[in-house]
Image: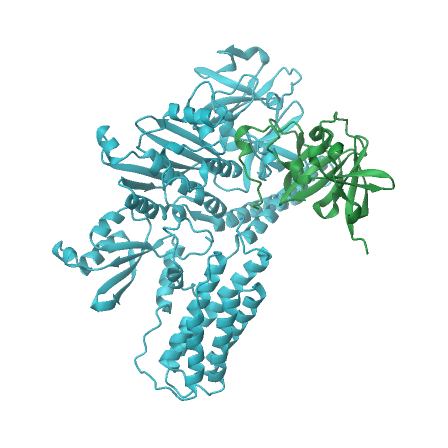
Amino acid sequence: MSATLESYVLFELAGSVYGLPSRSVQHIEMFEHVTLVPNANSAIDGVVFSRGQVIPALNLRARFGFPRENNTLRTRIVFATIHDRTVGLIVDTAREFRNLSTENIRPIEETLTGINGKYLKAVTKVADRLVLILDLEAILKVDDVQLTPPAQTALPQTATP
Amino acid sequence: MNEEKPAGLDAELLDDFFAEADEHLLGIRQALLHLETSVGKAQADPKIIEDLFRNFHSFKGISAIVGLGPAEAVAHATEDFLRLMRGGKAQLTAKGLEVLVAATQKLVQLAAAFRARKPLPGYESLLADLRQQCDSSSESAPVSKTLPRPENSPDTALLTKIEEARSRGLLLWKYIFSPSRESKDRGVNVNTVREQLAKAGEILKATPLVKSQGVIEFEFLVAAQDTPTDIAEWEAKGVTVQIAEQEEAAPKPLSPAEAPTLEEETHNPFLAPSHVVRVDLKRLDDLMRITGEMVIHRSRLDAQLGQLHGSRVDLRGVQEVSSSVARSLRELREAIMRVRLVPVAEIFARMPFVVRDLSRQTQKQVRLKLSGQETAIDKYLIERLKDPLLHLVRNAFSHGVETLEERTAASKPAEATIELSAATVGDSVILKVRDDGRGINPNAILRQARKLGLEVPDVMDNAAILKILCASGFSTREDTDRVAGRGVGMAVVYSTVRELGGNLTLESEEGRGTQFNLRLPLTLAIAETLIVRAAGQTCAIPQSFVREILHATEAQIQIVNGIEAISYRAGVLPIVRLAGLFQLKSAPKPKMCVLVITSERGSVGLLTDDILGQREVVVRALRDPLIQVVGITGATELGDGKPVLILDGAALTSGSVRPEGRLDMSEQTN
């Protein structure tokens, strides 16, 4: 039986390694500048431009309830796309692209669900280190993010102007 | 636009298919027109047959690519028939031509149904007809000399007239007069109808139609500036009114009642090619984006030139060129924008039919008043606003307008009025939907909100009511009838308006009526702004909202009614601190700038540390729900790649902005 490989982007956050399938990652940039947005959700550090679009920069530490840290030269923004929405995820650092064998990726165990359990999809191991595969959809779900009430009703936008 | 496409297919591929299908159908129609003269001749013009063959063949090919099997089959069978004719084995008979026309119509219907994702019409009988033509053609069928003119073959003179009328912004209407004994008794005949129509617009074409049992109807094609609001009057005279506009960019039918049937669509021949080019909106968007980028590059160039200032090189020549480039860019931008502008009549024109249909289903008598139809706004806005406006008109009809008994009891005229208006105010367009109905009962809304567990505000003013109405899941089940409840919901109206960079407000008075105001940017692309700064944050504010710039010191700021304000002219001007918006504190400065922001809702002073200058900026929408916040309409960049937020002047001028300058929904919609 031959194992199927899928490419993942691995990055670090608060001492753990996380992964996202490469096909949902547009590109990765160094953290340079975000523009503050008043009244946005507390996990939103602001907005950045990416390919002419204004993209929210979501602080993954804040989203997961970890303490925020100052941005360093290693801080990266991972531009991830799902359902035609693109969001910049601010992570401690991005490590590498890695082909992971899909058969070793297992659904998340109940016991693993810590504070960020509901944002995880699966787990796998790379060289004896746990890699937590993120559920991008859950991360971007706005229902459990406190927003100004009417904005909550906004549908995910896929339109181009 | 987020047009739904048949599943599993690349949207771009489908767009190409429809565009190509249009082209081939156009070619087929033209060839068929010419072919008429060949009926009965020993051999039809081989060039035209070849042309037809090629078009049907291509149609077959593209249908196969997108998996439109029935169209493939029809085109294939037609090809067989044409092949016989091409080989001289078949003569073109009147019946043969009829079948070719029918096949063309069928292809149009199939493509239209495919696009609208509706069930495909049947085509088997047509295939049988085509096969029969192939079979009988070898026996040299008798030729009929009286060839009925194919119904959908447009004559070119008419097409030119139609095109010319459209280019003048006129709308096309089809008035069908069916004379009856009653109309005759009332002194209405085809001549009086014609005279009255001539007053309403320009009659492009009048066609008598012979119906079954010798009944004759007259069809008038009229080009007019305005939408007829007197449909009921016409109907009383035995005249029905229809839109003769062709249905192109509306894949989603507005409602079952008004959706043109497939049959109607086939009576709308595509326009002949001439100087009119149909352009996909996306291509114009591309042009606009590129122009926007050029504007930014030009600003950077200017900034670079500014840095060279004082050097020994004479820059005057370069600067002159730079400003010429700026001028040309402005013209280019305006030219593209003009192409995108269409009159709101595109939406308004449908409303009389909606209201008429609703009136028929209920006992309510409603007059629809339209104004400002010529107001031109961006095509993208038109597309996005179709459903929200439809929803508001339906709402006005079903929730706003009382029943006949209620109106009589309230001694109001039996006939209610719904008013739909559009007007441009500065850089914005304001659309209003107003009814003279019962108004909104705050207590009923409050009850319902409590039942649904929605957050209930202390004061039920119009803003609070609107907030509840727009909450997702809100619906007053009490009076849901078949008219309401099938629309898009106020939540979607609200989010659409917000997303387009506009805002929605409500004015309602119990017993007097309800009015929804939609304020939208006239164009989406570029705005004149002032760039301001406070506590390290740079923002842009559209200049159209800035009436005046004042200087102020901290000492001048006083607390009035718990709100920070400065004296301004004869009164006081409430202050919003830009730094406060970001929950930041500015370092104390001896002198600060106050921008007097004014909209139709009042004035407010925006307190900033500094004004950096005046800039023409490209507005980028904030599309992600995570960053759609009240008080911000979009973002732009000033050449350094950093987003700069564009403030929403209308939200700032709500008149009840809290002292610390926080904005929320209740303030925004006051």
B428 or B530: nearer the viewer: B428
B557 or B237: nearer the viewer: B237
Task: Give coordinates of residue B240: x percent, y percent.
Answer: 27, 55
A99 or A105: nearer the viewer: A105
Chain (green): A
Q: How many marks?
A: 0
Left or right of B176 on screen, residue A27: right
Q: Residue furthest right?
A: A127
B559 or B135: nearer the viewer: B135
Task: Give coordinates of residue B585: x percent, y percent.
Answer: 65, 18
Left or right of A140 on screen, residue B242: left
One can see residue B276 in this view: no
Query: Toward which corner of the image does residue B584 lie, by quadrant?
Result: top right
Q: Residue furthest left?
A: B185
Task: Give coordinates of residue B275: x percent, y percent.
Answer: 46, 62
Specify the colour of chain B: cyan
B445 in relation to B30, above or below = above
One can see residue B410 in this view: yes
Residue name at image x 36 percent, y 69 percent = B155
Left or right of B493 on screen, residue B555: right
Residue name at image x 45 percent, y 52 percent = B250
B65 in relation to B419, above or below = below
B218 in relation to B94, above or below = above
Q: What colouring method underlies this structural image?
A: by chain
Query: Toward which corner of the image does residue B366 lie, by quadrant?
Result: top left
Quadrant (top left, top right, bottom left, bottom right) of the C terminus of chain B: top left
Task: Give coordinates of residue A45: x percent, y percent.
Answer: 68, 30
Left or right of A85 on screen, residue B399: left
